[in-house]
Image (tube, grey):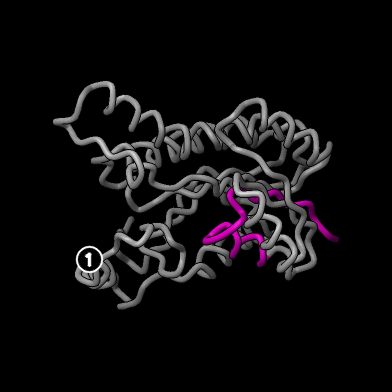
Amino acid sequence: MSRIVLVTGGGGGLGRAVAARFSAAGDTVIITGRDAGRLAGTAAEIGARAITCDATDPGQVTRMAGEVGASLDVLVNMAGGNTDFTRPAGHDADLEDIAAAWRANLGANLVSAVLTTSAVLPGLRSGGAIINVGSIGAEYASTSYGAAKAALAAWTAGLSADVGPRGLTANVISPGYTAGTGFFRGRLTEQRETALIGATHNGRAGRPEDVAETAYFLASGGARHITGQTLHVNGGAHTTR
């Protein structure tokens, strides 16, 4: 049976890959994002419905939830990214700039997921899944981006307990370096890329489909007893036990 799937930040990168995976399986997919043009293009290419929405804006999220409708099966909170690339502020910066930089990353990567989840939660049907996308950066958390992703994982663990009685799961996918996403916005040097790949056990960069397939699995019937977890998709660059 076709499910209704909402993917925030679905216009490009990992969000596009995840949305395309669900769409290819015959699910009804809704993608959101701030860039209306890119969003519309992606929707046309993968067979999805586009709703322009800034996931950090409560008013826009409320409107988006109304357009999604009263029923939803899968939510993938992909919207985010490292805002330090556009608003850097080191420890020696002016305190106002530091505060703005931290608020930007917390808003983009944590608050966006909290707002979206809260807005659509009443419509999520039993058997559904909430999938939040974190980062290997959460394991080090030396920056506002890493701290925001660490907070996302902590929040998801608590969310799992809240929504479990309703028959819902909540998990985090935590990717490592993934090529072809534009995450570094042209700032990734060849030396840095070599180091990131060298940190893996399988000697390759991640691919968008690695995350897409993990998201699809977490929303499947085979993952109904997996909840409150962080699944690391990084080729062994960060290991757990």
Give 43 or 173, whichever is nearer the viewer. Answer: 43
| Spot occupied by residue 112 in the image (x, y as percentages of width and height) | 54, 35
Residue designated by label 1 = 192
Q: In this view, does 241 lie above or below 198?
A: above
Q: Where is residue 78 in the image (x, y as percent from the top left)?
A: 55, 49
Q: In which quarter of the image is the C terminus?
A: bottom left
Depth order, front residue of 25/156: 25
Instruction: Tell me the kind of residue under disc 1.
Output: Arg
Magenta-drawn stretch contains 202: no
Going by the image, does 237 lie left or right of 116?
Answer: left
Quarter in which the N terminus is drawn: bottom right
Query: Which residues are the magenta region?
Result: 1-21
Q: Of residues 162 and 214, which is closer to you in this image?
A: 214
Question: From what the image shows, is residue 99 above or below residue 157?
Answer: above
* SS at mark 1 in the image: helix
Residue 161, percent from left and from top: 57, 33
User: Which residue is at 79% across, 41% downward?
Assistant: 68
Find out whether residue 15 is within the magenta segment: yes
Question: Residue at 55% across / 37% down in the picture?
Answer: 113
Q: Find the residue positioned furthest to the front.
A: 37
Label 1 CA crowd tier, 10 Å (few <14, some 14–19, many 20+): few
Residue visible at 67% across and 66% down? 20
**Residue at the image point whose x is 29% and y is 63% from the top:** 188
Given the current orientation, which residue lies at the most extreme bottom position?
203
